[in-house]
Structures are given as structure tokens and as C-alpha cells.
Amino acid sequence: MEEEKVQTATLACRPEAWFERLPLVSQAFLARHHRPLVTVSYAQSVDGSIATRNREPLRLSSHASMVLTHRIRAACDAIVIGINTLLADNPLLTVRLVEGSSPQPIVLDSHLRIPLHARLLERTDRHCWLACTDQHESQRVGAVQGRGAQVIRCRHDRRDMVELPDLLRQLGERGIRSIMVEGGGRVITSFIEARLVDQMIITIAPRLVGGLPVLDRPATGNGSLLRFDPVVYQACGPDMILWAQPQWQDA
Ligand SMILES: NC(=O)c1ccc[n+]([C@@H]2O[C@H](COP(=O)([O-])OP(=O)(O)OC[C@H]3O[C@@H](n4cnc5c(N)ncnc54)[C@H](OP(=O)(O)O)[C@@H]3O)[C@@H](O)[C@H]2O)c1
């Protein structure tokens, strides 16, 4: 991302000022890397919780931060969540708080566990894409396709889940230039572990929760560290927004 790098700075200005300069979609990136640009964006409490321990949804972001989140959604070609987030939150993943079109919703759902009454399957503006592994019953494929979903068959990784490099390659072939990974923790952890994160935009809400941590396992690999450089901090209503590019340092 060198040609698109945003300078390190602590900007005492409205979020719009630095947001406008963020690379969120790039045809050049797709052409060069044969995969979309990946922006991981989620909300956490100060102690790093993204939900309750029982995976019940938690409203962490202020209205101002939610507006920013919807702007990121509107700027990306697609939005990715894990099946557990769908089961917990039953989200629509639309853009409602700002002008702009909603990104293509994609659910990582290796075994096509999505309930046929999920709200994402009710949408008529954009039919959901379900990324699954190649081991599943064709009857289930027919059922979700009957609800309008498109199935993207991917290779499976060592955990029997969707192999992310294969998924991103296929998304690139479909012309998806950028994705916003909204969660939850397992999906974010997998993207970090695979080193497939180009930037992170984290809303930090001034709350202590003691809930579900964002990383569900050490994700940086044996002895290696993930640090952020460059990094920008920005107040947004009562919240802090952290924008950063991850750098992996091998021990
Ligand atoms: N605060 C926030 O910003 C925020 C945002 C989103 C979600 N959340 C919260 O996060 C919680 C859910 O998080 P979670 O960690 O339990 O689950 P998750 O990340 O939403 O979904 C994980 C599931 O996705 C499927 N998956 C398929 N391929 C995968 C891959 N390569 N890597 C990882 N997962 C893959 C797996 O299920 P299969 O094996 O069945 O495919 C896996 O168990 C909910 O409580 C939700 O409210 C919070």
C-alpha cells in the first residue's frame, strides 16, 4: 500500500479530515495483489471486549462512531462477517446512516448453517454471498440458493473452515476491490493470522465489559508480534477511533 499510505499523525480535527484520505477501494491494489484491499473494522470496549461472554450483542459505538462505520461500509465493495455474528446479531449490513449504496454482504459459513429466515436472506437489493467449504450437502446448497443466496465454494483450511486466501482470490475474480471485515472475533483472528489485513479501524468505547475478547487465540504466530505503524488516533463523540496499518515482525 506504499503509494496510498496515510501519514502518521494525531489529528485534532473532525473524523472526516483523515477519513477522506483513507484507501478503502483500489483497482490498482486488486490488479497488483489479485485480491481485494482488506479493512478490518469493529468496536470494542477499553478492555478489548466486542460482545458479552455469551456472545450476546453489545451496543458499544456512539451514534457518531456508527455514522463512521456506515461511511466505511458505503465506501467498500463488500462486507464480511462470520456465521456466529449472523446467528448472534441477525444483521442487515446495510448503509442507513449516510448516503451511499450498501456493500455486497458475504458470510463465512463453512457448513451453510445460516437459518433460512435470516434477515440477510430477506434483502432484495443485494443477495447474500455465502462462502462455504467444498464439503457439504447439495440439498443445503439448493435450500440457500432458493432463498436467493449465492454460494462461493472455497477450499478448507486446517480448521475445516473457509480458506481465506482462496476466498479473497475468488472475490478478486468477481471484481471485488475492497472488503470491510466487521467481525466477529474468530473471523478477525483468522484474517490477522493469515496476514491478510491491510488496515484496521477500531472504535474504542469508554466502557469496561469483561466480555468476549476480539482475538480468540494468539493470532500472530509463534514468537512474532503484530504492531501498528503508522497509526492515527481520533476522537469521535465519546469514542476513540484508531486507524492503523499492521506490521508483522518475525522473531
Ligand atoms: N463489536 C463489534 O464490532 C462486533 C462485530 C461483529 C460481531 N461482534 C460479536 O462477535 C460475536 C461473534 O464472534 P465469534 O468470534 O463468535 O464468531 P464469528 O467470527 O462471527 O464467526 C466465526 C465462525 O465463522 C465461520 N468461519 C468460516 N470460515 C472462517 C475462517 N476462515 N475463520 C474464522 N471463522 C470462519 C466458522 O463457523 P463454521 O465453521 O460453521 O463456518 C466460525 O466459527 C457476536 O457476539 C457478535 O455480536 C461484535
Image (tube, rainbow, N blue to C red):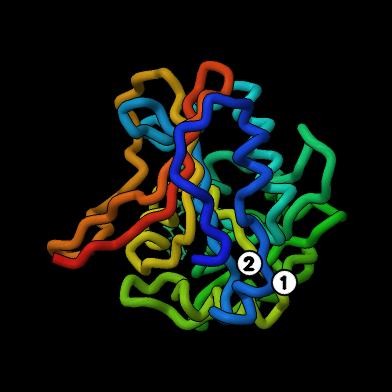
Work out whether mark 2 precedes mark 1 in sequence or the reverse, and give the earlier one: 2
Q: At which x and y percent is residue 236?
A: 57, 24
Q: At which x and y percent is residue 248?
A: 29, 62
Q: Is residue 33 left or right of residue 24?
A: left
Using the image as rendered, state which of residue 80 and residue 87 is in the foreground. 80
SS category of the residue bearing label 1: strand
Q: Is residue 32 above or below residue 150?
A: below
Q: Residues within 10 Å of mark 1 (few under 14, many from 20)?
A: some
SS category of the residue bearing label 2: strand
Give the residue type that dot 2 points to: Leu
Q: Residues within 10 Å of mark 2 (few under 14, many from 20)?
A: many
Q: Is residue 56 visible?
A: no
The residue at 68%/56% (across/down) is 76
Identify the image quadrant of residue 25.
Answer: bottom right
Q: Which mark is residue 130?
A: 2
Q: Is residue 196 visible?
A: yes
The reply to whether dot 2 and dot 1 touch (C-beta < 8 Å) is: yes
Q: Is mark 1 within 8 Å of ligand 1?
A: no
Identify the image quadrant of residue 3.
Answer: bottom right
Q: At which x and y percent is residue 60?
A: 50, 25
Q: Is mark 2 within 8 Å of ligand 1?
A: no
The residue at 67%/34% (across/down) is 16
Give the residue type that dot 1 points to: Gln
Q: Is residue 246 above or below residue 111?
A: above
Q: Which residue is mark 1?
A: 150
The residue at 34%/20% (across/down) is 208
Rounded to the nearest whole Å, what is the CA distance between mark 2 and mark 1? 6 Å
